[in-house]
Image (tube, helix red, strand yellow):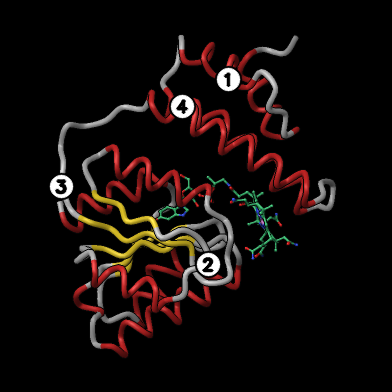
Amino acid sequence: ALPLDERLKRRIIDGERNGLEDDLDQALETRKALAIVNDTLLDGMKVVGELFGSGQMQLPFVLQSAEVMKNAVAHLEPHMEKTDEDGKGTIVLATVRGDVHDIGKNLVDIILSNNGYNVVNLGIKQPVSAILDAADEHKADVIGMSGLLVKSTVIMKENLEELNQRGIAADYPVILGGAALTRAYVEQDLHEIYQGEVRYARDAFEGLRLMDALIG
Ligand code: B1M
């Protein structure tokens, strides 16, 4: 049999859910929930991305892997560390228009929520109007946008331009994340055009650090 860590990784790659929870419980005996996500499960998703990108895995199987990933995160979530702090600030979080990828966004939600932030998670395929309505309604301190497709990086730029046009850029620092972005694109190109603050988060932890820096 494969070592536990390898087995968990394979479960993500193969989209194999049977016995997932037992393996996760076993892993929890020696490791923290977030470490299991970051060091093992995300490694598995990375392999899925590579296999899919090189044509060795078809979309329905990617979907199964994503489902197993979501189940695993849901199972681990109650075991994640939480601070007692509360009400540190509000972020409206969304996957941008045309993009359905939400595993990363939902991890960001968990980590920010566990660390005292109020997260308004709008879900996937959110047009900028919906994001701005929610930001206004919930008096958001920060807007967070996620997107994994290359075209989402263009949509994020358009969204920032919309905030400029509405004259509300100064009110909303924006955090952007997702696999197709680069730090240079956000911190140079988008920084040039946006009239407020725009920052790049490589992962959910950087998202948390940015929240602390922007409003903490
Ligand atoms: Co899609 N997909 N997918 N996919 N998919 C990618 C993104 C792709 C790179 C795969 C590949 O080709 N190698 C590719 C994009 C290519 C491109 O644009 N150039 C791709 C494609 C092409 C597609 C479709 C177009 C396929 C098709 O239909 N022919 C389609 C798109 C549909 C659409 O959006 N309109 C599609 C569909 C899907 C599934 C539905 C099957 C599934 C998503 C299921 C779901 O999310 N509910 C899926 C998956 C699973 C992937 C890959 C394999 C894995 C993504 C993932 O969940 N990673 C992905 C490969 C890859 O990313 N390299 C791929 C794990 C997750 C934790 O990472 O979301 O990056 P990530 O989040 C990270 C950081 O980015 C960061 O924190 C997280 C880690 O801590 N982060 C933030 C993310 N958002 C943040 C926000 C923040 C802060 C940090 O603050 C606001």
| Distance between mark 1 and mark 2 Cα atoms | 30 Å
Question: In the drawing, what numbered circle is on residue 125?
Answer: 2
For disc 2, does the CB lie below 8 Å from ligand 1? yes
Q: Which residue is mark 1?
A: 21
Instruction: Indicate left or right for 108 with 86 as reference.
Output: right
Q: Amino acid at mark 4?
A: Leu
Tell me the SS state at disc 1. Answer: helix
Question: In the drawing, what numbered circle is on residue 87?
Answer: 3
| Ligand 1 found in image quarter | bottom right
Circle nearer the N terminus (2, 4): 4
Tell me the SS state at disc 4. Answer: helix
Instruction: Indicate left or right for 210 with 79 as reference.
Output: left
Residue at the right extreme of this rendering: 56
Circle nearer the N terminus (3, 2): 3
Circle nearer the N terminus (1, 3): 1
Q: Amino acid at mark 2?
A: Lys
Tell me the SS state at disc 2. Answer: loop
The number of numbered badges drawn on the structure is 4
Please tell me which residue is depicted at 80% across the width and 52% down the height of the picture: 54
Question: In the drawing, what numbered circle is on residue 13?
Answer: none
Question: In the drawing, what numbered circle is on residue 76?
Answer: 4
Q: Amino acid at mark 3?
A: Gly
Tell me the SS state at disc 3. Answer: loop
Question: How many C-alpha atoms fall within 10 Å of the one at disc 4: few (<14), some, or many (≥20)?
Answer: some
Residues under numbered marks 1 and 2 in contact, where contact means CB atoms less than 8 Å apart? no
**Image quadrant occupied by the N terminus:** top right
